[in-house]
Amino acid sequence: GPLLEVLAVRPGDVLAAGAPVARLQRAGDLWVKVFLPETEMGRLAVGREVGVTVDSFPGRTFRGKVAWIGARAEYTPRNVQSPEERRHQVFAVKVVVEDPQGVFQSGMAASVAVDGAPPPR
């Protein structure tokens, strides 16, 4: 079911018209956006399972699944001619996170690893 996040509002606060007081989020809507260098694109595909870690839970790895890979480079240097320069071209990747215990919070920083390899930077 939906999760309710009450924003920083207290009884007696005066709010502007239309100001949010709470946010609804479905449990299955947790995801992480990472940026993968072009040279690593062959490592991922939609549906691939990955490991997700967050600083709040050191030593614990959560399951994630690649839901989407961007079709265009997000950051592209002006002149891409060499393999070294292609390393700086990155593609956005959306990873949906499994969180059955409900420990993730929106906005937490996370790292994603594929098959135990270091996370993309």
Image (cartoon, helix red, strand yellow):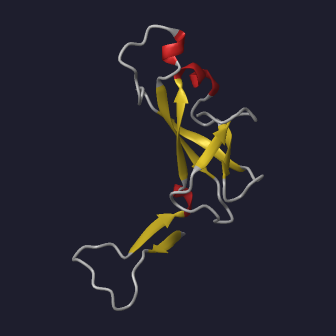
Residue projecting furthest to the top: 81
Residue at the extreme left: 17
- Is 16 on the left or on the right of 109, as rendered? left
Residue 3 image offset from top left, x and y in percent: 52, 70
As rendered, which of 118 and 91 lies closer to the eye?
118
Residue occupying image coordinates x 42% and y 13%: 80
- As drawn, the residue found furthest toward the bottom would be 12
The picture places residue 107, in percent across and down from the top left corner, at 51, 57
Q: Is residue 48 above or below residue 81?
A: below
Quick one: 77 or 50, which is closer to the camera? 77
Left or right for 74, reference 29: left
What residue appears at the point 63 percent right and 44 percent down from the top-left corner? 111
Question: Which residue shows up at 70% across the image and 34% down it?
Answer: 118
**Which image quadrant is residue 20 in?**
bottom left
Up-down relation of residue 67 to residue 7 (above or below): above
Camera-side residue of 112 and 13: 13
Q: For this view, does 61 lie left or right of residue 30?
A: right
The location of residue 67, given as percent across then percent down, is: 54, 41
Which residue is depicted at the point 57% across and 51% down? 109
Position of the C terminus, as image quadrant, is: top right
